[in-house]
């Protein structure tokens, strides 16, 4: 007679639990930046002529070369039609876009192991002896 019993054989199977996908989307958000803008304005200065100030070099007054040149220029332009052009400038905001990498994102997998207790019922044969009486 052969006695048999079941053994609990435990192994593992691989089952898919979830799928993960990286999706890059473009979203738009408002950005506010303050920039300082310069604008030139025309300023006219008028200076009154002080009594006794001459528009010519009389040779007696001591003038610097720059002052003397201004006097000569004033005498030359007296009663002449004259036009002076001044160009004024202003700044305006300029917007440019620059694409800058911010971060790199990678997907990877890591396996975590744990012990799990598995229970099950197994059958086994038991052989008994009987005494047979005559």
Image (cartoon, rainbow, N blue to C red):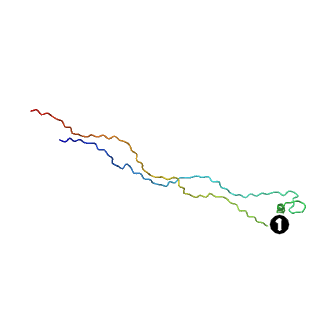
As drawn, 107 above or below 117 = below
Q: Which of the 4 image quarters holds residue 97?
A: bottom right
| Foreground residue among 66 and 1 | 1
Mark 1 — residue? Answer: 76
Provide residue 70's location: percent of width, then percent of height: 82, 62
Q: Position of 110 compared to 42: left or right?
A: left
Q: Farthest top residue?
A: 133
Q: Position of 109 compared to 121: left or right?
A: right
Provide residue 127's location: percent of width, then percent of height: 19, 37
Provide residue 134's location: percent of width, then percent of height: 9, 33
Callout 1 secondary element: helix
Q: Number of callouts in the render?
A: 1
- The local crowd at label 1, few if under 14, some if 14 to 19, many if 20 or more residues have their Cα within 10 Å, is few
Provide residue 39's location: percent of width, then percent of height: 68, 57
Q: Farthest left residue?
A: 134
Q: Position of 54 compared to 22: left or right?
A: right
Residue plotted at (83% across, 66% down): 76
| Foreground residue among 68 and 126 | 126
Q: Position of 77 compared to 131: left or right?
A: right
Q: Farthest right residue?
A: 60
Q: Which of the 4 image quarters holds residue 42?
A: bottom right
Quadrant the N terminus occupies: top left
| Foreground residue among 118 and 18 | 118
As drawn, 117 above or below 45 = above
């Amino acid at each position: 007679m052969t006695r048999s019993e079941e053994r609990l054989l435990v192994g593992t199977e691989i089952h898919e639990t979830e799928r993960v996908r990286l999706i890059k989307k473009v979203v738009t958000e408002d950005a506010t930046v303050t920039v300082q803008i310069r604008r030139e304005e025309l300023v006219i200065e008028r200076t009154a002529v002080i009594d006794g100030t001459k528009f010519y070099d009389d040779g007696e007054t001591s003038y610097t070369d720059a002052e003397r040149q201004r006097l000569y220029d004033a005498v030359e332009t007296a009663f002449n039609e004259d036009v002076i052009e001044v160009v004024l400038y202003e700044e305006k905001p300029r917007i440019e876009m620059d694409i800058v990498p911010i971060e790199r994102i990678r997907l990877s997998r890591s396996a975590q192991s744990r012990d799990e207790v598995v229970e099950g019922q197994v059958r086994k044969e038991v052989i008994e002896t009987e005494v047979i009486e005559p």
